[in-house]
Image (spheres, rainbow, N blue to C red):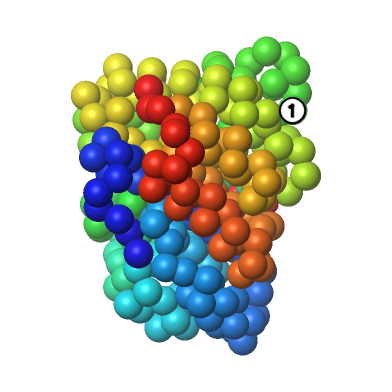
Amino acid sequence: MVSSTNAQVVAGRLPLVVGNWKMNGTRVNCVELLAGLRAAGPFDAEISVCCPFPYLADVALSLQGSGIGWGAQDCSEHEPGAYTGEVAAVMLAEFGCRHVIVGHSERRVYHAESDIQVADKARMALSHGLTPIVCVGETRSEREAGSTEVVVKRQLSAVIHALGHCVSQIVVAYEPIWAIGTGLTATPHQAQAVHAVLRAQLSAASTRAGEMRLLYGGSVNAVNAQELFAQPDIDGALVGGASLKAADFSAICRVASHVALGSTGKSRT
Ligand code: PEP
């Protein structure tokens, strides 16, 4: 259950944990996983699950009335039309999606998505009532070259340029590529430093930047989540591998719930 009385709600930054199933699961085991997640709830943080497109109807049915949201992992930057293989944002809205991930590094790398294309996807999602979760992040070599800040600012800047002050309606996920699926997590200090840079950049574009949720993603589990979520500019997580097991994912959701309830003593920037 989402509490409306805690400090984060007042600040407009209820912790958010989003599962990214990627191209995993079967029709049967995704329903089992969601039954386990429902049974582990309710949670005091906002929780959402981004599943493969073909499972959206089953996921919607499984999560209806649970308070847990659902969404997809990509959408087209175009309105419906002759774009074979693409899925339009308006179609996701038909399935009751709350979120859509855009610009995940696996899309940027394997499908050559550009910063501008990602920004156009975010705009399309917003125009159909979905909240885009815009992913940004650097490669290991970019970090080693000291260009993390330049890379993530360039990626976010395309979105700010496309959305203007509406940028406050998105969620940003900082996902260092070297930490995704590798078991290597950015230290809380490293992650917080990048989140602070992103929030400062957003603050220059919107007076509501202080209310925006910035998620961390990259090998998050229930143990490292505790310190990550305690950082002033980290408002939750985008979770890949650990979202595929109800017990692992719900343990992360519980950590976020403790933050939401104010039991961690976390302070906000
Ligand atoms: C992701 O792909 O968004 C992700 C964060 O994956 P993992 O948690 O497995 O690193």
Three-letter amino acid code of the residue under disc 1:
Arg
Q: In which quadrant is the C terminus drawn?
A: top left
Q: Residue at x 25, y 49 (%)?
A: 5
Q: Residue at x 39, y 57 (%)?
A: 44
Relative placement, left or right, of 9 versus 228 is left
Relative placement, left or right, of 7 versus 50 is left
**In the rendered view, would you say 250 is above or below 65?**
above
Visible residue check, residue 26: yes
Q: Residue at x 72, y 14 (%)?
A: 145
Visible residue check, residue 55: no
Residue 82 figure quarter: bottom left
Q: Position of residue 255 (x, y in %)?
A: 54, 50
Using the image as rendered, state which of residue 27 and residue 102 is in the foreground: 27
Q: In which quadrant is the N terminus drawn?
A: bottom left
Using the image as rendered, state which of residue 117 and residue 144 is in the foreground: 144
Relative placement, left or right, of 34 versus 213 is right
**In the rendered view, would you say 128 is above or below 137?**
below
